[in-house]
Image: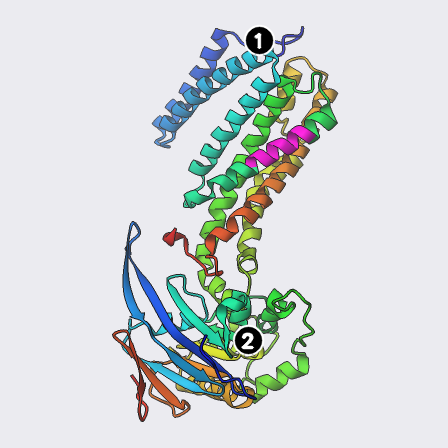
Amino acid sequence: MPKVTTHNDRASLRLPSLFRRFSHHASDEQTQYRTLFADLSFTLERGDIVDLVGPSGSGKSTLLTTLAQLNPHASAELYLEGQPSTSMSPEWWRRQVAYLPQRPTLTGETVREAILMPFTLRVHRFGDDGTALTETRPDESMLRRTLDTVGCSDIELERSPQDLSVGQQARVCLLRTLLTVPQVMLADEVDAGLDEDNADKVGDMLSYAAREKGMAIIRVRHREADGRANRTMRLAAGVLTQVEGGETR
Amino acid sequence: MNTTTGSYPIDVLGLIITILLVAVAAGMSYAMRLGVHRQMLWATLRSLIQLLAMGYILKFVIEQNNPWLVFALIAVMILAAVQITMSRAANIPRSVMPSVLLTLTASVILQVCVVTELIIRPHPWYAPTVLATLSGMLLGNVVSAVAVAMSRFFADMEARRYEVEMLLSLGATPFEAAKPSIVSSVRLGMIPTISQLASSGIVLIPGMMAGQVIAGADPLTAAKYQFVVLAVISALTLMADSLIMVLIYRTSFTAVHQFITTSAH
């Protein structure tokens, strides 16, 4: 097993290899597979903001869902702080390596309920070995404070999530994941289709997460580079390369 | 089946008149272009043949009075019920068949133990008149509840795929991610059963009670029988409905708890 840095506040996510069989549903009875990429490998450090760019269909989303162990068509060898993903339950892995889907999906009657939903899940109540966790659920004042800190003071907690604008929904979804404090956040085009103002707020929230909470963040974006990323990687034709000097597309 | 005094057996003329009435109704459907005449006639014919066949089989089993024969008949009924459930439920993976078999078998065994041996206590204990008929009624109810619940479950999971993905990505277990679909499926499967239970006796005199009264039984005895049968069948249907959900929800997920959409089955 490869040795990985774990000293102090440095955590890393390693991905030594990755294979994916892509299922193409042209028609239901004919499932075709093609390999999007194989044997990719990279390391992510704590506090990193990495932009993942590349042509449409190159598998950027697939890469993110694979890292979160959400993709049934991919197999990968994953390590978090030296711990292989196979040493823990998929739930425990996803709690730490959180995938943030592009489409905002909020549950519950109010925004408050939607934001606090993750804390009702077993993974926030019990450890991977079944022992009860004494995790503190964000209280009212912390919730309000966080909303203000990340520029979401326009969001009322009592409202129905369905009444929010698309931009607000995207930010509430981001906030929901942020409050669970994962070690890695995989943001899949979370600013797509948003106006400049909302996209900027989303960018600020992610910067805040990396800077203040030490989360490692991978962003798939289709916008101009916003200067928040400290690295840019390009996925094209199954090859992952480091981009020097930043790139937008 | 009942040959006590006071019963009114149906002769061949009676059957012919019944079929004539169905034919008249089908004729009206044809005239009004309702488009159900063909299905109606076909279903009537099937039901006549199937019921008569069941009548002959029951008669044979009752006359033989052999416990093995009774259980063989029940086993065949369960297998047929599995087949009907699988064909009635839309868009479900074939892989759930063992779960359906297990659910139906468990509910019949429970019914035999509880109703037959604790509530009715027939002599002999395997009395085919009680065991076979009650199992048939139970299976009929469980089949429709389980078929409805399974169809709803897979359709609902498909409709909720973004929510399921979101829940899993936040660390939800497959059960937590599937729970809203499980709840709505169990409820939908139970609607006919519960409404039948609640409305019986007000306007509706359920088939079994009606049959017993027509055959000359004391209406109060018939009512007690009907209540026991309806209540127990409802309870067992709810158990079967919940059991099938617990058994099948995992088929929507891989071994590492990834969601598989129904189209990928």
Q: Residues within 10 Å of mark 2 (few under 14, many from 20)?
A: many
Distance between the alpha carbons at the discs numbered 1 and 2: 70 Å
Left or right, residue B113 beside residue A178: right
Secondary structure type for disc 1 = loop
Residue A121: image location, x then y, percent = 60, 66
Q: Give above or below for A147 relative to B131.
A: below
Look at 38% across and 90% down and name the residue there: A226
B199 falls in the magenta region: no
Please state which amino acid type lies under the numbered disc 1: Pro
Q: Quarter of the image holding residue A132?
A: bottom right
Q: Quarter of the image holding residue A32?
A: bottom left
Q: Which mark is residue A176?
A: 2
The residue labelled by disc 1 is B9
Residue A124: image location, x then y, percent = 62, 70
Tell me how the rendering is colored: rainbow
Q: Give above or below for A157 relative to A206.
A: above
Q: Which mark is residue A136?
A: none
Which span is picked out in magenta?
B104-113
Left or right, residue B217 beside residue A160: right
Same chain letter for marks 1 and 2? no
